[in-house]
Image: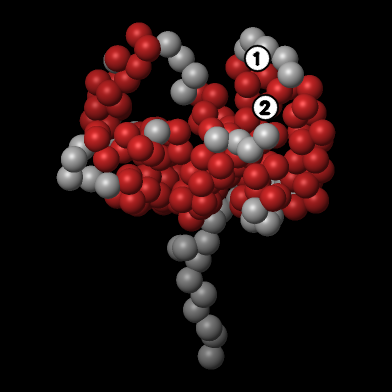
């Protein structure tokens, strides 16, 4: 008699799969480059992103959270932080843009919503309780993880699965190693 294997909860690979060794090499290269980036004025998004990647990679290694999923989420987290580098004028129309995006039924709305919730939880956790008084920071963590998982469920894009599983862990690493780094 054959055994039935359930594949619905397993992350689908997208593109070329990177090994843990590849991620460790990249992390060490970024960490070695970090002192050079910290001592210069960050003038563009690319330098900012490289500095964020280096700090996040260092945090993953120091917290001993070493896995391909952690490194993948770390790189994605740096991308999210870089994406939210913009002017105040751009922020004003962001909520109405999100509301319009939600009405289209596009599954990438869930990724965008997850990114916004991740940014709030990682960068401004003290303000989360003030945004909507009935919601606490933990509620934002849960909503963000669910948005990423819904995005993964609708599209099969691997980062949605990993961010849904490591949402809280990655916000903690961002807080400790990017927002409030110990010198």
Q: Residue at x 37, y 45 (%)?
A: 144
Residue found at the very far left of the displayed protein: 134
Q: Is residue 162 left or right of residue 18?
A: left
Q: Is residue 4 above or below residue 81?
A: below
Q: Residue at x 62, y 50 (%)?
A: 70
Give 166 or 131, whichever is nearer the viewer.
131
Q: Is residue 127 above or below residue 91?
A: below
Q: Describe the element under mark 2 as helix, strand or loop.
A: helix
Q: Residue at x 29, y 49 (%)?
A: 139
Q: How many numbered circles are shown? A: 2
Tell me if label 1 and label 2 are in contact, CB under 8 Å: yes
Residue labelled with disc 1 = 42
Give 56 or 75, whichever is nearer the viewer.
56
Tell me where residue 16 sits by quadrant. Answer: top right
Asked whether residue 86 appears in the rendered view, the answer is yes
Return the x and y of residue 5 as percentages of the image width and height: 51, 75
Q: Sort mark 2 into few (<14), some (14-19) or many (20+) by Cα contacts within 10 Å.
A: many
Q: Is residue 127 left or right of residue 29?
A: left
Residue labelled with disc 2 = 51
Asked whether residue 108 appears in the rendered view, the answer is no
Return the x and y of residue 39 as percentages of the image width and height: 74, 19
Give 2 or 123, whichever is nearer the viewer.
123
Residue at mark 1 to residue at mark 2: CA–CA distance: 9 Å
Return the x and y of residue 36 as percentages of the image width and height: 79, 22
Q: Describe the element under mark 1 as helix, strand or loop.
A: loop
């Amino acid at each position: 008699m054959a055994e039935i294997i359930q594949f619905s909860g397993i992350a689908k690979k997208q593109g070329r799969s990177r090994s843990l060794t590849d991620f460790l090499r990249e992390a060490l290269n970024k960490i070695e480059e970090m002192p050079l980036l910290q001592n210069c004025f960050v003038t563009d998004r690319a330098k900012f992103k490289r500095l964020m990647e280096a700090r996040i990679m260092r945090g993953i290694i120091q917290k001993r959270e070493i896995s391909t999923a952690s490194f993948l989420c770390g790189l994605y987290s740096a991308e999210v932080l870089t994406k939210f580098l913009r002017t105040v004028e751009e922020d004003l129309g962001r909520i109405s843009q999100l509301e319009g995006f939600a009405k289209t039924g596009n599954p990438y709305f869930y990724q965008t919503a997850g990114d916004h919730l991740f940014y709030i939880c990682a960068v401004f956790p003290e303000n989360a309780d003030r945004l909507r008084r009935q919601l606490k920071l933990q509620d934002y963590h849960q909503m963000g993880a669910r948005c990423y998982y819904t995005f993964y469920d609708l599209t099969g894009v691997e980062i949605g699965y990993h961010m849904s599983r490591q949402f809280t862990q990655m916000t903690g690493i961002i807080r400790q190693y990017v927002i409030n780094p110990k010198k």
